[in-house]
């Protein structure tokens, strides 16, 4: 049985990919959030080949540069995960000093909070998403 990240095409919108990893748009509750997913199912970063690890970093850096150029965040937080979904993946979180939780970890809403509209989406417009994707392909 495949995991959600192995079948990323069914669940996410692609920004950029190479032979080993893919960047997709993440949570609409964090402005500019991107997930970077290793294409081959691997549960631990140490399971990756050197080529896969380099491919993961290549996607992270290219998409991160485009986010910096378009959104101008004060900083970008980078996070590698594999525990909640047992598949190596990472997150790009653009951060601004004006963020409500500046200096703290990102707080995503629970399903109940999102359903009750306690959190407000900060999703980028289609035009801004296109601008970021275009930069990844044409400038990096």
Image (cartoon, grey):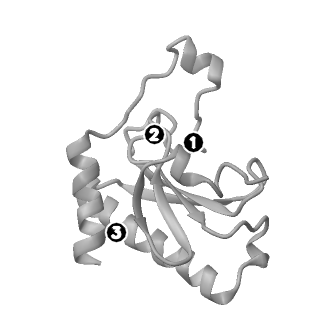
| Residue 18 image position (x, y, % from top left) | 46, 75
Q: Earlier in the sequence, mark 3 or mark 2?
A: 2
| Residue 104 image position (x, y, % from top left) | 58, 43
How far is mark 3 from mark 2, CA to CA? 18 Å
How far is mark 1 from mark 2, CA to CA? 8 Å
What residue do we see at 29% from left, 49% from top?
129
| Residue 14 image position (x, y, % from top left) | 42, 56
Asked if residue 52 is positioned above or below residue 92 in the image, the reply reads below
Q: Is residue 16 left or right of residue 40?
A: left
Asked if residue 116 is positioned above or below residue 120 in the image, the reply reads above
Are the residues at dot 1 and dot 2 in contact (C-beta closer than 8 Å)?
Answer: yes
Q: Earlier in the sequence, mark 1 or mark 2?
A: 2
| Residue 133 image position (x, y, % from top left) | 29, 60
What residue do we see at 75% from left, 68% from top?
42
Viewer-nearest of discs 1 and 2:
2
Q: Which residue is mark 3?
A: 65
Q: Secondary structure at mark 2?
A: loop
Are the residues at dot 3 and dot 1 in contact (C-beta closer than 8 Å)?
Answer: no
Q: Secondary structure at mark 1?
A: loop
Q: Is residue 67 left or right of residue 23?
A: left
* Residue furthest out toward the front: 1
**Residue 6 appears in which quarter of the rendering?**
bottom right
What residue do we see at 31% from left, 69% from top?
136
| The disc label shown at residue 16, or none | none
What residue do we see at 50% from left, 39% from top?
27
How far is mark 3 from mark 1, CA to CA? 20 Å
Q: Earlier in the sequence, mark 3 or mark 1?
A: 3
Q: Which residue is mark 2?
A: 30
Q: Which residue is mark 1?
A: 106
């Amino acid at each position: 049985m495949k995991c959600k990240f192995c079948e990323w095409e069914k669940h996410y919108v692609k920004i950029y990919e190479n032979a080993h990893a893919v960047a997709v748009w993440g949570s609409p509750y964090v402005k500019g959030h991107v997930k970077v997913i290793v294409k081959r199912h691997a549960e631990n970063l140490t399971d990756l080949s050197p080529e896969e690890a380099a491919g993961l970093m290549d996607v992270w850096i290219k998409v991160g540069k485009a986010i910096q150029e378009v959104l101008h965040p004060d900083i970008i937080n980078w996070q590698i995960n594999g525990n909640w979904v047992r598949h190596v993946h990472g997150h790009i979180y653009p951060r601004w000093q004006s963020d409500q939780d500046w200096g703290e970890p990102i707080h995503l809403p629970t399903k109940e909070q999102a359903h009750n509209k306690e959190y407000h989406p900060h999703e980028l417009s289609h035009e801004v998403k296109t601008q970021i994707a275009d930069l990844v392909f044409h400038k990096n």
